[in-house]
Image (cartoon, rainbow, N blue to C red):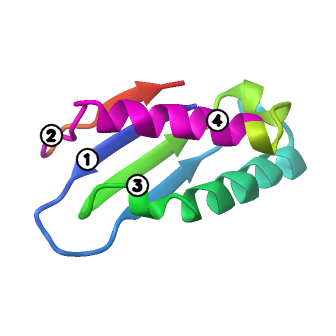
Amino acid sequence: MVLHIVSRDDEQPVHVGLVVGRAVGNAVTRNTVKRRLRHLVATRLDALPQAATLVIRANPSAATTGWSGLGTDLDSCLRRLDRGHAPRKQQATPVTA
């Protein structure tokens, strides 16, 4: 999975978008991956910087990865953000798991 994050100047809550393309699988598989990612991100919203826009792009391997694997990948990407990869304004910072 790849994360792109951009900070904003407003005081709105964190915005999260999911991108799950056709390469991941058929519609049923893509929706399953989206539901899993949506749930995993919802439990980790406190770890995200305030006033940020986060886009998560699922790789094709997400179709065969279970809950724990997706959670591990997401946690790995979020840790990289915490280790000094602070988001810059108006420029997306990609983080790959």
Q: Which mark is residue 72?
A: 4
**Dot 1 and dot 4 residues touching (CB under 8 Å):** no
Give percent across and percent down for residue 73. Answer: 61, 32
At a point 76% along the width and 40% down the height, the residue shown is 68
The magenta segment: 69-89
Under circle 3, the secondary element is: helix
Chain-order first, disc 4 or disc 2: 4
Give percent across and percent down for residue 26. Answer: 86, 41
Q: Which mark is residue 6?
A: 1
User: Can residue 13 be seen at all in this image of the molecule?
Assistant: yes
Front residue of 94/20: it is 94
Alpha carbon separation for disc pair 4 and 2: 25 Å
Which tag is nearer the camera, tag 3 or tag 1?
A: 3
Alpha carbon separation for disc pair 1 and 4: 22 Å
Q: Is residue 13 above or below residue 41?
A: below
Q: Quadrant of residue 81?
A: top left
Crowding near the residue tagged with mark 3, few <14, some 14–19, many ≥20 C-alpha atoms within 10 Å: few
Chain-order first, disc 2 or disc 3: 3
Q: How many marks?
A: 4
Front residue of 28/11: it is 11
Chain-order first, disc 3 or disc 1: 1
Q: Which mark is residue 88?
A: 2
Residue kind at label 3, given as amino acid type: Ala
